[in-house]
Image (cartoon, rainbow, N blue to C red):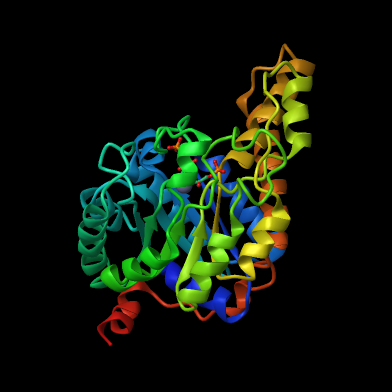
Amino acid sequence: MPLVPMRILLDHAAENNYGLAAFNVNNMEQIQAIMAAAEKTESPVIVQASRGAREYTNDAYLRHLMLAAAELYPQIPIAMHQDHGNSPETCLSAIKQNFTSVMMDGSLLEDGKTPAPYKHNVRVTKKVVKAAHAKGVTVEGELGTLGGIEDGHGAGLSAEEARKHLTDPAQAEQFVADTGVDALAVAIGTSHGAYKFTHRPTGDVLVMTVIEEIHRRLPNTHLVMHGSSSVPQELLEIIRQYGGQMKETYGVPVEEIQRGIQHGVRKINVDTDNRLAMTGAVRKVFFESPGEFDPRKWLGPSRSAMQKVCEERMIAFGQAGNAGKITPITCRQMRVFYKK
Ligand code: G3H
Ligand code: 13P
Ligand code: ZN
């Protein structure tokens, strides 16, 4: 089955009240891990690549790896998404490379760091919506600013500053009307990377009520949670056990994500949990077998560790069991939908 527009996966998830994990990829093993998890749990799939991932892999490798996934798993609908496009040019180049969905993150300026004025956000997002919808490609926008700095995408805000940049529900309503995005990423106090919260988060730092209010105002817009790794304590422990250094930290509890899914969240971005799982598995092999030098002996276990995380999220978010229930269509067919 050819790659499908992300919109059809989000629509199916909304109609059936579940969420879809969007996993970041940078290499073959990560794509294999996601697809193996999807096959086992019969889940539709969203694979996403950041700008950094596209640079690291080279678009041609990535494009062919995704074609291989589609060829090997014809029963699974797969959407390929540009994560945090920083400009219309980035999004348009992704579409040229077979991506079926793009995020125009106009909440930040093109440097990916500086919070952008609302007007800038609307201008660049609208431009991408026009070009992408003409090709049947899905668009995710973002309003509000995430707090992380360590991955280069966040605005570098302190927790207190980040609270001032949460999505304003009234402005969200305006933004969707102004731009016509298919999905909206909202800022509710999460950040990218492993160091999100210093304690298990409570409602004052992980502000789920913002999602509830936005969903009340925009019941037909698919909401997206970024920075939504759960940072499981057991994965941190494995890394520490085998010589790694991870400070005390807490992520977004799966139950809070499930609460979000009850209020319009359809896409949940998860990268860090897979990074932690892979790193722990590799450390374990090197610690236990210091003489090992066959990459398959450490890449294989890291792939299995990521597969386990993907399966757990697919089940917890409710996408498991839905792969065969979605009628696949191509981006070309999807163009008609946007002409209406
Ligand atoms: O947006 C954040 C993702 O975790 C991707 O991170 O830019 O290091 O690939 P990256
Ligand atoms: P995590 O760092 O919490 O996995 O978030 C990933 C993300 O939001 C990618 O866009
Ligand atoms: Zn993100």
Residue at 49% over, 68% down = 214
Residue 75 quadrant: bottom right
Left or right: residue 213 compared with residue 87 = right
Residue at 67% over, 23% down = 246
Quadrant assignment for the C terminus: bottom left
Residue at 46% over, 57% down = 186
Decide: is 301 above or below 244: below
Considering depth in this image, is 48 or 120 the residue closer to the camera?
120
Measuring from the top left, give residue 259's x and y in whole percent. 67, 64
Left or right: residue 274 compared with residue 109 = right
Q: Residue furthest bottom?
A: 340
Considering depth in this image, is 60 or 87 the residue closer to the camera?
87
For the question of whether residue 340 can be seen, the reply is yes
The number of numbered badges drawn on the structure is: 0
Measuring from the top left, give residue 226's x and y in whole percent. 51, 51
Q: Residue furthest top?
A: 291
Left or right: residue 192 compared with residue 5 = right
For the question of whether residue 74 can be seen, the reply is no
Measuring from the top left, give residue 16's x and y in whole percent. 62, 79
Residue at 45% over, 58% down = 185
Measuring from the top left, give residue 250's x and y in whole percent. 68, 37
Decide: is 191 above or below 185: above
Considering depth in this image, is 125 or 240 the residue closer to the camera?
125
